[in-house]
Image (cartoon, rainbow, N blue to C red):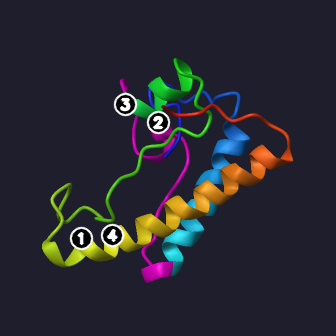
């Protein structure tokens, strides 16, 4: 999920953030078929102030700032059973790789990307 969490207003870079989310989620879902939703935090799950994605985007200028939740659909919450840990890691890794490729392509296309230290 991308900024903003504290408001339903879309950030200036919404289109490119959302396209990055879409690339990551498509790659992630292709691994085990797990369905993920993406979009701004406030409209994808609920309004939430103080997110790291809001901070890194709003204060540090990191355009591609995201928050990721586990694959649970409400049964286990944030404590997944052990048998879900490896599949969750496998699909998340594919999502991260797809997002990195998307960001690199945007950088190559012209737009400078803020570096994360």
**Magenta region: which residues?**
31-50
Residue, far right? 110
- Is residue 22 something that shows in the picture? no
The Cα–Cα distance between marks 2 and 4, rounded to whole angstroms, is: 23 Å
Q: Is residue 53 above or below residue 70?
A: above
The answer to whether residue 72 is left or right of residue 109 is: left
Could you tell whether 35 is left or right of 115 in the image? Answer: left
x then y, percent, for residue 30? 53, 79
Residue 42 circle label: 2
Q: Residue furthest bottom?
A: 32
Q: CA distance from mark 2 to mark 3?
A: 6 Å
Which of 95/11 is in front?
95
- Please tell me whether residue 68 belongs to the stretch shown in magenta: no
Which structural element holds mark 2?
helix
Do the residues under discs 4 and 1 have CB atoms within 8 angstroms? yes
Secondary structure at numbered mark 3: loop
Measuring from the top left, give residue 106's x and y in whole percent: 76, 47
Label 3 belongs to which residue?
Answer: 48
Q: Are marks 3 and 4 in contact (CB under 8 Å)?
A: no
Which residue has dot 1 on it? 85
| Viewer-side residue, 75 vs 116 | 116
- As helix, strand or loop, the secondary structure at mark 4 comes to helix
| Mark 4, residue position | 88
Contact flag, marks 2 and 3 (Cβ < 8 Å): yes
């Amino acid at each position: 999920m991308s900024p903003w969490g504290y408001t339903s207003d879309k950030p200036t870079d919404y289109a490119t953030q959302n396209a990055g989310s879409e690339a990551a989620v498509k790659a992630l879902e292709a691994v085990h078929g797990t369905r993920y939703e993406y979009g701004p935090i406030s409209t994808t799950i609920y309004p939430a102030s103080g997110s790291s994605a809001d901070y890194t985007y709003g204060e540090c200028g990191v355009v591609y700032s995201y928050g990721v939740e586990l694959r649970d659909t409400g049964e286990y919450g944030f404590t997944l059973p052990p048998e879900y840990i490896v599949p969750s890691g496998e699909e998340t890794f594919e999502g991260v790789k797809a997002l990195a490729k998307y960001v690199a392509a945007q950088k190559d296309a012209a737009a400078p990307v803020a570096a994360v230290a």
